[in-house]
Image (cartoon, rainbow, N blue to C red):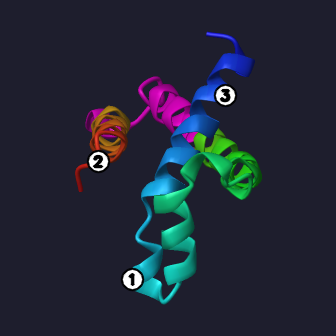
Amino acid sequence: MSSTVRASELRDCLAAAIREFPFDDYGLDDVSYLLEDTPDTQEWVPALADALLPVVRHLEAEAAAARKYAEEMRDFCSPHGLSVHYADQLIEVMDRAKEGQT
């Protein structure tokens, strides 16, 4: 998947999350009304999604680096295979977080 396609899909997901956010729960009733009444004319939604995109990319890069390090831990020399045990636990936790579990 090209990075342009990935960025576009991610931006679309962010925009959808922004549109679905309960702004009225935070005293931003006007924003909620605008999104309900004229969702397609709200140019600020894609602009906000674009602003959030670098933050999300940074977090994805950090998670990928942590996952890579956990995979490398399997090859560490450690007594009783502790590094493999901890690597498995780290990867399991990251997988659960990726699936939205805690």
Q: Position of residue 58 (x, y in %)?
A: 69, 47
Q: Main secondary structure of the magenta part?
A: helix
Q: Which residue is mark 1?
A: 25
The answer to whether mark 3 and mark 1 are in CB contact below 8 A is: no
Q: Which residue is mark 2?
A: 100
Q: Nearer the viewer, mark 2 or mark 1?
A: 1
Q: Which residue is mark 3?
A: 8
The answer to whether mark 2 and mark 1 are in CB contact below 8 A is: no
**Residue at image point 66% right, 18% down:** 5
The answer to whether mark 2 and mark 3 are in CB contact below 8 A is: no
Does the magenta portion include 71?
A: yes
Q: Amino acid at mark 1?
A: Asp
Q: Amino acid at mark 2?
A: Gly
Q: Looking at this view, is 86 or 49 the one in front?
A: 49
**Residue at image point 63% right, 38% down:** 11
Classify mark 2: helix, strand or loop: loop
Q: Alpha-carbon distance for marks 2 and 1?
A: 23 Å
| Quarter of the image where the N terminus is located | top right
Q: Position of residue 2 (x, y in %)?
A: 69, 11
Q: Position of residue 34 (x, y in %)?
A: 56, 66
Q: Earlier in the sequence, mark 3 or mark 1?
A: 3
Q: Alpha-carbon distance for marks 2 and 3?
A: 22 Å
